[in-house]
Image (cartoon, grey):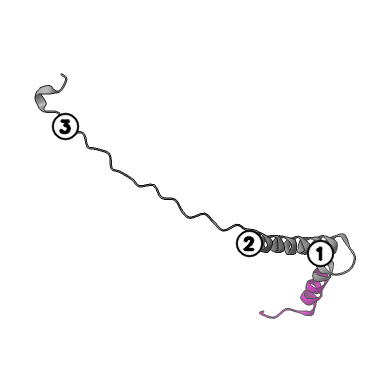
Amino acid sequence: MGSLSIVHWIIIIAVALLLFGGRGKISSLMGDFAEGIKAFKKGMQDDEKTAAPAEPVKTIDHQPAQTVASQPESHKAS
C-alpha cells in the first residue's frame, strides 16, 4: 500500500516531462518563471549593495502632561 506501482511512476514521469521537458508552452512558462526568480534575487542583492547607510534614529523626548487638579465640590457646576 505504501509503494507506487509502475503505472503511478509512468504518470509521475509524464507530468514531470510535460512541466519541465520538451519544447511545449508549459516548459517555456516554467523557464520564464525560473528566470524571473533569478532576476528578483539579483535585484534584491543589488539593492542591498547600493543602499545608502541609514540615518541615525531620531528620538523625541516625551514630557508628561501636567495633571489638572480636581475642583472642590463647592465649585462644581450644578
| Labels 3 and 1 touching (C-beta < 8 A) | no
Residue identified by numbered label 2: 48
Could you tell me which residue is drawn at 9 percent across and 23 percent down? 74
Q: Report x, y in % for residue 22.
A: 89, 68
Lower sequence index among marks 3 and 1: 1
- Above or below, 52 relative to 13: above
Q: From the viewer's perspective, is the residue at label 3 or at label 1 nearer?
A: 3
Q: What segment is highlighted magenta in the picture?
A: 1-15
x, y percent for residue 78: 15, 18
Q: CA distance from mark 3 to mark 2?
A: 56 Å
Q: Nearer the viewer, residue 37 or 19?
A: 37
Q: Earlier in the sequence, mark 3 or mark 2?
A: 2
- Residue 42, x across and y down, in percent: 71, 63
Residue 64 position in % (x across, y down) = 28, 42
9 on left or right of 53: right
Residue extending furthest right? 23
- Give the residue at mark 3: 70
The answer to whether marks 1 and 2 mark residues whose Cβ atoms lie closer than 8 Å is: no
Circle 1 residue: 31
Instruction: For marks 1 and 2, give the CA distance.
Output: 26 Å
Question: Which of pointers 1 and 2 lies earlier in the amino acid sequence?
Answer: 1
Residue at point 70% right, 60% down?
A: 43
